[in-house]
Amino acid sequence: MAALQPFSCGVVGARSFPLFEGLRLAPTAARTSSCAGARGMALKRSFSGLVVKAATVIAPKYTSIQPVGDRVLVKIKSSEEQTSGGILLPTTAQTKPQSGEVVAVGEGRTIGKIEIKIGIEAGKQVVYSKYAGTELEFHGSNHLLLKEDDLIGILETDDIKDLKPLNDRVLIKVCFKTCCSFSYVVAEAEEKTAGGLLLTQATKEKPSVGTVIAVGPGNLDPEGNRTPLKLEAGSNVMFSKYAGSEFKSSDGAEFIVLRASDVMASLSS
């Protein structure tokens, strides 16, 4: 019996920023794969993506879920399981959804002797931290049970640039090469090394300068009052490179939502 010869496949993809288009994550850019086997014959192979079920499946006999404390229940958007070209993607290559609709909220939390109700209502479209919460399947749909503080903003329009940050979150438009709002020049993320080696997105130098688009109302103090953030819309800032959640708007502009404490400096010309 002839021995099977090993072969290798390469997969090339685009940057995996969540792309908002009418509150739906746009289909991930098409991947192309090529495989070469023995005798120089190109082989086409298709793989079914590894399907990972929600961690908890709620039995059909239960008709509702009521979050406890400062938790909220969000019905999440489904991730795209295949490219526009019809290629099935493994779970690791899919863009993980970061938006959904609030379907239920808890009674709130207590700070000292003060009871603080959750400041968001059912029916709101929200954006949340990428790896927050507990996933569950309820009546055939994927949901996320998370703390109110894991919600990073409310999105009432079709574009991430209109996000209303919550608590101490800040929405920043990331600046590359040159930024239209100020003259500070930012080096664009390198695509290859000096020796000509192409870099993956994970190894590229990430820009860390941008313009503040919107700020949240601030966190609550021990008396239950909001502490306003010192940042203002229109400010030019430098932020921590690996903080926050990255997004791309429908026109291709890149944004990041992070906590005010991750802003390291203000820039002025």
Image (cartoon, rainbow, N blue to C red):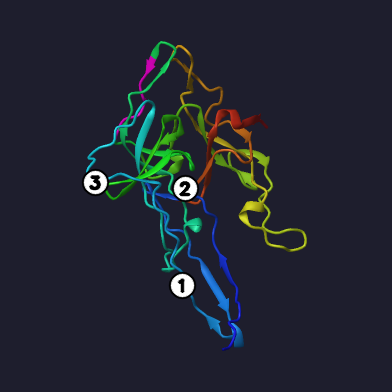
Q: Quadrant of the C terminus?
A: top right
If you read the primary sequence from the N terminus, does the residue marked by circle 1 or circle 3 appear first?
Answer: 1
Coordinates of residue 237 in the picture (x, y in percent): 62, 33
Badge number at residue 60: 3
Which one is closest to the eye, mark 1 or mark 3?
Answer: 3
SS state under label 1: loop
Which amino acid lies under the numbered mark 1 shown in the image of this protein? Ser
Q: Which of 141 and 242 is in front in this view?
A: 141
Which residue lies under the disc numbered 2? 249
How crowded is the residue under tag 3: few (<14 C-alpha within 10 Å), some, or many (20+)? few
Q: How far separated are the C-alphas under marks 2 and 3? A: 37 Å
Residue at image position (39%, 49%) is 54
Which residue lies under the disc numbered 1? 46
Coordinates of residue 7 in the picture (x, y in percent): 60, 76
Residue at image position (56%, 67%) is 11
Which amino acid lies under the numbered mark 3 shown in the image of this protein? Pro
Give the residue furthest to the right. 195
Region of the chain picked out in magenta, as a range: 115-122
Q: How far separated are the C-alphas under marks 1 and 3? A: 34 Å
Q: Quadrant of residue 88?
A: bottom left
Coordinates of residue 221 in the picture (x, y in percent): 49, 16
Which one is closest to the eye, mark 2 or mark 3?
Answer: 3
Our reading of the magenta stretch's main secondary structure is loop
Which one is closest to the eye, mark 2 or mark 1?
Answer: 1
How crowded is the residue under tag 2: few (<14 C-alpha within 10 Å), some, or many (20+)? some
How crowded is the residue under tag 1: few (<14 C-alpha within 10 Å), some, or many (20+)? few
SS state under label 3: loop
Q: Is 117 placed above or below 134 here?
A: above
